[in-house]
Amino acid sequence: MNNPGFIGLDDIQKVYIPAGFSNFKIEGRSLGSAIILEFLLYYMTKPEYQLKVREEIYLDSMLDLF
């Protein structure tokens, strides 16, 4: 998320939504499930709940994240 091409929540709320963008692609097909999970947590979970959600997902033995 330190990549200069990374678009954060502030960018989305202050630049892209006012410019008329309403659909965002979180990530392509090339990354593994664990990385995509981190993107989903970043964009779709409040920061104070991210650790709890992450723990619940990683402890669920039905998921194959790696």
Image: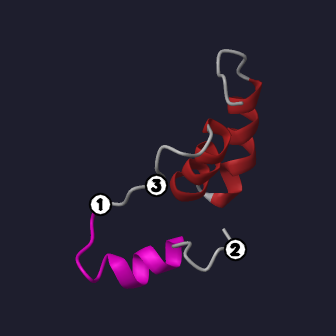
Residue shown at the point (76%, 36%) measured from the top left: 55
Q: Amino acid at mark 1?
A: Asn
Residue shown at the point (41%, 76%) measured from the top left: 13
Q: Residue furthest left?
A: 20
- How many angstroms separate mark 2 from mark 1 (CA)? 22 Å
> Callout 3: few (<14), some (14-19), or many (20+) C-alpha neighbours within 10 Å?
few
Pick the residue in front: 60 or 27.
27
Indicate yes or no whether the magenta region holds residue 14: yes
Quadrant into which the N terminus falls: bottom right
Residue at mark 2? 2
Q: Amino acid at mark 2?
A: Asn
Secondary structure at badge 3 equals loop
Residue at mark 1? 23
From the viewer's perspective, tell me whether residue 56 is left or right of residue 39: right
Secondary structure at badge 2 equals loop
Indicate yes or no whether the magenta region holds residue 22: yes
Residue at mark 3? 26
Find the magenta span and give its range: 8-23
Q: Amino acid at mark 3?
A: Ile
From the viewer's perspective, tell me whether residue 61 is left or right of residue 16: right
Secondary structure at badge 1 equals loop
Residue 42, quarter of the rendered image: bottom right
Residue 36: % across, % down: 58, 45
Which of the two labelled residues, at mark 2 and mark 1, occupies the earlier sequence position? 2
- How many angstroms separate mark 1 from mark 3 (CA)? 10 Å
Q: Is residue 56 above or below residue 52?
A: above
Residue 30, quarter of the rendered image: top right
Residue 6: % across, % down: 56, 72
